[in-house]
Amino acid sequence: MCGGKSRKRALPCKEQDLLNVVLAFLELDGRIAWAKRMNTGAAVRHYQDKLGRSKRHFVRFGFKGLSDILGQTADGRLLALETKRAGETATPEQIAFVDTVNRFGGVGAIVYSLEAVQQRLAQANITRRVQCVPGVRLR
């Protein structure tokens, strides 16, 4: 439930909600070999060197524009999905990344709903399916 004790919304309230629904869907979709959440940002690690001096180490992970979800289709193409809440817009870097993925044969989209993901996968015409092997987890 979102927006109050008794009101329900048809769309997820937070981007994280949509992200979780999309990842759960992709996990079950035979056209997708694997899909994972990608994080971007930076962190500072504070530590002391051997001489006891206070130091900090700056670490950047991912890059500007990297999609929320990266994966691979069963026919070997890169999958890049940027999830957005209704009313939010993608950054120029996110748009450029998705455009690049699509230009070079991948399957990329900025999506605002699970239905948008389903439509993009249908447009991609992925004909191959992941073969399930008993006892082997592919994802």
Image: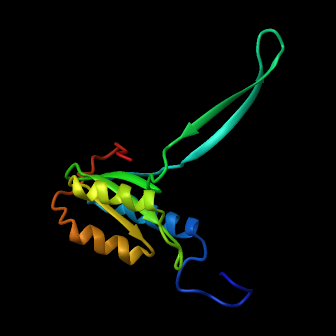
Please state, as top left, top right, bottom left or bottom right, where the N terminus lies in the image. bottom right
Residue 8 x %, y %: 62, 88
Q: Is residue 112 above or below residue 124?
A: below
Residue 126 x %, y %: 19, 62
Residue 75 x %, y %: 19, 52
Choose between 27 and 111: the one closer to the eye: 111
Left or right for 125, reference 34:
left
Choose between 38 and 94: the one closer to the eye: 94
Farthest-out residue, right: 52
Q: Is residue 3 above or below residue 117?
A: below
> Which residue lies at the image location 50% right of the left edge and 43% below the top edge?
62
> Which residue lies at the image location 32% right of the left edge and 72% below the top edge?
118
Farthest-out residue, top: 51
Left or right for 73, reference 14:
left
Choose between 138 and 33: the one closer to the eye: 33
> Which residue lies at the image location 39% right of the left edge and 52% below the top edge?
70
Residue 129 x %, y %: 21, 57
Q: Is residue 94 above or below residue 84?
A: above
Farthest-out residue, front: 92
Res 28 quadrant in image: bottom left
For the question of whether residue 127 can be seen, the reply is yes
How many dots with numbers? 0
Farthest-out residue, bottom: 7
